[in-house]
Image (cartoon, rainbow, N blue to C red):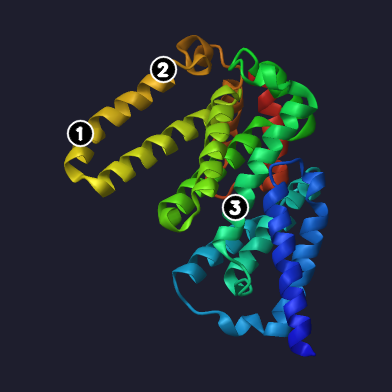
Amino acid sequence: MKNKLILAINYINLLSALYLAATSIYYYHVQKIGFILFFSSYFIEVFLEKKWKNIQFNKQTLFFGFLLLFFSLALIYYPFDSEKYFATLMNKRFSLLGFGFVGLLGVNKKFKLSYFLNVFVISSVIAIAYVIFRGAGFTDFLKGEVGGINFTISRIKYVNQHMMFNFFLNVSFIGVWYILSRRWKLIHWAIRLLYLLATLVIVYTLAISEGRSGFLAGVFISGGFIFYEIWRRNRKIGFIAIIFIPIMMVYMVLHQDRISNMQIKSEQRIFLWEAAIPVIQETPFFGHGISKAQERYDIYRIIYQ
């Protein structure tokens, strides 16, 4: 009976984690039920499987230990902080604090990397298709950056802002490469074709998206994959690729309108960095606390804006 209960909890935990992976491209309200199911089932798992017995001092323990410490700093500093922004900002850190514990104690044996990589890829294609057919239109989507305006408006309305959206697409891009590079001969040709079509859609979407960081990440990831695959097959050609691939990447970046000198010089968000510097300078070692820091930042942001 106990084994069946543990198995059921394991599957609930896995499915809720996959749901979180699939919906992390969308606004947070879509993920709430996933967080509740994941952490409640994980809490039960911890006691049923006595996960604390699995803790061993190694690199993984050290990594997640520092992760826990970092996201606990806000709670440690709380007696010296103010309360104006504390609850709002801390809410954004609780899930990260929780995943620190998950990393430290470990997940159940039903988890497989391939599940999550495939979920990322499928979710990316579904999200892009949803934006196209819900508002942007397929014709506009094919117009490149010119048609990217309607795509952007629809994406913001129905899915998410460009930072999260493009980050998700880049993770999916990495996922496709990881799967194909390790299982190419084992995958049916029709499935390979679907993976390659998904990659084409993802890369094209990154090219027309308004975010610069997502586009740059996509360019560097592409260059890195091309070089790695050439190097793995032929070292001599790989040495030549070391020269030509960076040139190709720089060419793509410099010929992107969003990264032109004029755009960078007129970038309005530079004031956000200018406002952050004096906040850090006031107390560079101990900091202000997450709430007081936001209060100080608000003051300087008005000045520099």
**Which residue in the rendered view is the most extreme toward the bottom?**
1
Q: Which residue is mark 1?
A: 240
- Vertical relation: 245 (above or below) 30: above
Q: Residue at point 60% right, 63% down?
A: 68
In the rendered image, the quadrant that contains the N terminus is bottom right
Q: Amino acid at mark 2?
A: Leu
Point out residue 150 in the picture as x, y percentages from the top left corner: 72, 18
Label 3 with label 2: CB-CB less than 8 Å: no
User: Residue 250 sits in which quadrant?
Assistant: top left
Q: Which residue is mark 3?
A: 118
In the image, which disc is placed on residue 254? Answer: 2
Name the foreground residue: 202 vs 152.
Answer: 202
Q: Is residue 80 left or right of residue 274?
A: right
Answer with left or right where residue 162 lies relative to residue 199: right
* 21 left or right, relative to 58: right
Q: Earlier in the sequence, mark 1 or mark 2?
A: 1
Figure check: 43 above or below 47? above
